[in-house]
Image (tube, rainbow, N blue to C red):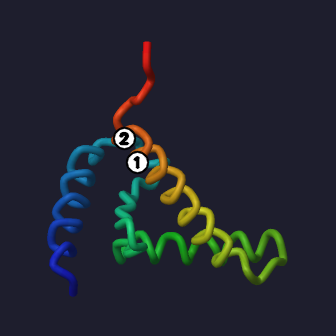
Amino acid sequence: MSLEQPRRQGLRQSKLEKYANIDARYLFEPIAVETLGVINTSACHLLNDLGKRMTVNSGEARETGFLYQRISVLIQRYNVVLLHDALPDDSTD
């Protein structure tokens, strides 16, 4: 158990409380992902289940892996945006 896990679980709980009154037709699952790829446990269960359902529909056995790869790419893209926004603007007017 990493030192960040209690913090992630606390954030998860606050999001669950925030969306407690959401319509019963929807499933709300907060997904917390650290930069180095650690995903909260309940989100892993959801993503694995979703990947299995996608496999049943598509016939592609690697759907779960593809789903995790998509999330990884999204994290990388977001990190690039954060890095770009953190750099000083060196435009000369």
Residue 50 lies, in percent from the top left, at: 60, 69
Residue 37 or 26: which is nearer the viewer? 37
Q: Are marks 1 and 2 in contact (CB under 8 Å)?
A: yes
Type of the residue with mark 2:
Leu
Q: In the drawing, what numbered circle is on residue 83?
A: 1
Q: Nearer the viewer, residue 43 or 57?
A: 43
58 above or below 18? below
> Along the horizontal axis of the image, is 53 left or right of 39?
right
**The quarter of the displayed image where residue 37 is located:** bottom left
On the rendered structure, is 74 left or right of 61?
Answer: left
Residue at left 39%, top 59%?
Answer: 29
Which residue is denoted by mark 2 in the rendering? 87
Q: Position of residue 32 (x, y in %)?
A: 35, 62
Q: Residue flagged by tag 1: what amino acid is it? A: Leu
Front-lying residue, 23 or 77: 77
List the single residue furthest toward the front.
Answer: 92
Occupied quadrant, residue 57: bottom right
Residue count near mark 1 (Cα–Cα under 10 Å), binned few <14, some 14–19, many ≥20: few
Q: Residue at x 43, y 19 (%)?
A: 92
